[in-house]
Image (cartoon, grey):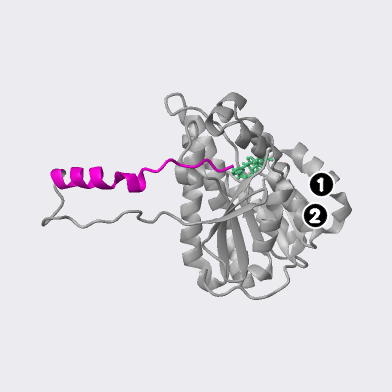
Amino acid sequence: MTEGCESVVPDLKNKVILVTGAGRGIGRGIAEYCLNQGASVVIAEIDPDRVAAASKALSRYENRILGVTETVSTMEGASRTVQASVERFGRVDVLVNNAALTKDRSIIRMSEQEFDEVIATNLKGAFNCTKSVLPQMLEQGAGRIINMTAVSGFSGNPGQTNYAAAKGGLMAMTLTWSAELSRKNIAVNAVIPAAWTEMSETIPTEGLIQAVGEEMYRRLRSRKPSQVAPLIGFLASDAARGITGQCFSIAGRELAVWGFARPVVQAEAPDEEWTMDSLETFVKEKNNLWQKPVEPFI
Ligand SMILES: NC(=O)c1ccc[n+]([C@@H]2O[C@H](COP(=O)([O-])OP(=O)(O)OC[C@H]3O[C@@H](n4cnc5c(N)ncnc54)[C@H](O)[C@@H]3O)[C@@H](O)[C@H]2O)c1
């Protein structure tokens, strides 16, 4: 955090919020919440049917909603999305890099194409949209970028080489951009959501239950996109001024702030420099300090 949070009532009136992948799931939940809080929202989405369905469902906000059918995975698509937003609303205050897809498979079976497609949308897509929106935010003298990421970006996840790599990269870009842009009054944060969506439906049930247990599985199925949206609304609001370079997770009622990778155990070489023997002794004595089982988060 750069400075203390000001006491401002969270309010999204007059904000223009561009949400990628907002045709369904968490993105659509964010779009609806922000519209309800008074923002103008761009529903940017690759699938024309989802753009149409979301626009129809939210048509009561007619003057404050813009549906754009474009892909984030090319610079041209991202650039056209930003251009359409500025043409319609005159500015973009907040970019939510939410569009993503999964193509899960073990590294043994994953094809180069499956790797490239996920990286192109989930990682490069966020780069493309951020690059495209930055000139506008710099001109405005203010902006917010929120990157939707995932625990697998910290912990890895069997079957998700491509997805985990993209989400880990997105965490790294969040830190990098927040450091580069805070002096320009542009805040960049990451959010790890948990909601049962059509993306969640692609995970084989049996494997998921095996990985997290019945109880966690039931909890995950009960999570709703609408439970994620208030955190995004808050980070988009003036009340979140000063918050940058942070990663929040939200799962139902559970909120957490995540620390990025820091050393967990430190030691100095007992002699002039580390040897294979002293390293072996160190590992034997201290491995209980860092080899802790990873708690599943859902
Ligand atoms: N659902 C969860 O519990 C969960 C957990 C961790 C992270 N996330 C992240 O939250 C975000 C939303 O996830 P969701 O569960 O709502 O997924 P979802 O699959 O329901 O929605 C993603 C949307 O992105 C769109 N999209 C895909 N490729 C695109 C492209 N190239 N250009 C534009 N739009 C594109 C899809 O058409 C879809 O409408 C994603 O970034 C996801 O990785 C979700």
Determine the CA span between mark 1 and mark 2. 7 Å
User: How far across and how far down the image is residue 63, in percent?
Assistant: 85, 58
Residue at x-position 42% and y-position 25%: 108
Magenta-drawn stretch, dominant element (helix, strand or loop): helix
> Ligand 1 is in which quadrant of the figure?
top right
Q: Could one spot residue 44 in this view of the protein?
A: no
**Residue with the most extreme right position:** 60
Q: Secondary structure at mark 2?
A: strand
The residue that appears at 46% across and 27% down in the rendered structure is 106
**In front of the other: 264 or 188:** 264
Residue 132 is a magenta residue: no
Which residue in the structure is indicated by mark 2?
A: 65
Q: Amino acid at mark 1?
A: Ser
Q: Residues within 10 Å of mark 2 (few under 14, many from 20)?
A: many
Quadrant where the C terminus sits is: top right
Residue at horizontal 34 percent and vertical 48 percent from the top: 289
Eyeballing the image, is 120 above or below 190? above
Q: Quadrant of residue 234?
A: bottom right
In-image side of 199 versus 295 (left or right): right
Q: Are marks 1 and 2 in contact (CB under 8 Å)?
A: yes
Q: Which residues are magenta?
A: 277-298
Residue carrying label 1: 55
Q: Position of residue 20 (x, y in %)?
A: 66, 49
Front one among 180 and 239:
239
Residue at the spot 59% in from the left edge and 64% down from the top edge: 135
Mark number displayed over residue 217: none
Q: Quadrant of residue 272?
A: bottom left
Q: Is residue 6 rendered to the left or right of residue 268?
A: right
Q: How many marks?
A: 2
- Which numbered disc flags the more N-terminal residue, 1 or 2? 1
Q: Is residue 8 visible?
A: yes
